[in-house]
Image (tube, rainbow, N blue to C red):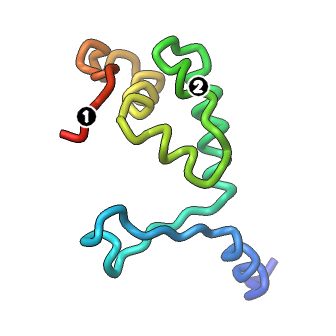
Amino acid sequence: KGFKLADTAEKAKSIITVGGMSAASAEGTAHSFSEEENLAFVDWINFQLAEDVDLKKDLPIPEDADGLFRAVHDGIVLCKLINSSIPNTVDERAINKGKLNIY
């Protein structure tokens, strides 16, 4: 199968581009991801961490465009994913599971 520009254009339709959260990072920068990648990550995380008692309030992660980003904002899901891949990499006692403030 050869290269077809139409295939690339079709894939580009499902790419979501967002700017940074602050004025400094939004200026001239953009982050992009495909809807398929987003859904794949959400499905995998929901499957891997479904039984985790600390994440009952956060799982399942919704499949909307920013559900994944909302779910990982405090780092708990990321720490849990690391530990599901390589157990005891992140000490559970070091994970701040309480309500975080902006500082």
Q: Which residue lies most toward the bottom here? A: 5
In three-dimensional space, the C-alpha distance between marks 2 and 1, rounded to whole angstroms, equals: 28 Å
Please name the residue shown 54% across and 44% down the image.
68
Three-letter amino acid code at disc 2? Gln
Q: Does 38 appear above or below 58?
A: below
Q: Relative to 79, say whether 43 is above or below.
A: below
| Farthest left residue in view | 103
> In the image, residue 75 lies at what x, y percent?
36, 35
Q: Is residue 28 left or right of residue 49?
A: left
The residue nearer to you, when weighing 5 against 93, is: 93
Q: Look at discs 2 and 1 and give the one toward the viewer.
A: 1
User: Relative to 3, is 102 on the left or the right?
Assistant: left
Relative image position of residue 37 (x, y in whole percent): 62, 54
**Residue 74's x, y, as percent?**
36, 36
Q: Amino acid at mark 1?
A: Asn
Q: Is residue 25 above or below residue 99?
A: below
Which residue is at 38% across, 29% downward?
76
Quadrant into which the N terminus falls: bottom right
Query: In terms of image quadrants, where is residue 86?
Result: top left
Q: How many marks?
A: 2
Quadrant assignment for the C terminus? top left
Helix, strand or loop at mark 2: helix
User: Left or right: where does residue 25 sit relative to residue 53?
Assistant: left
Write down the residue under mark 1.
101
* Residue drawn 53% across the image and 22% down it: 57
Q: Which residue corresponds to mark 2?
A: 48
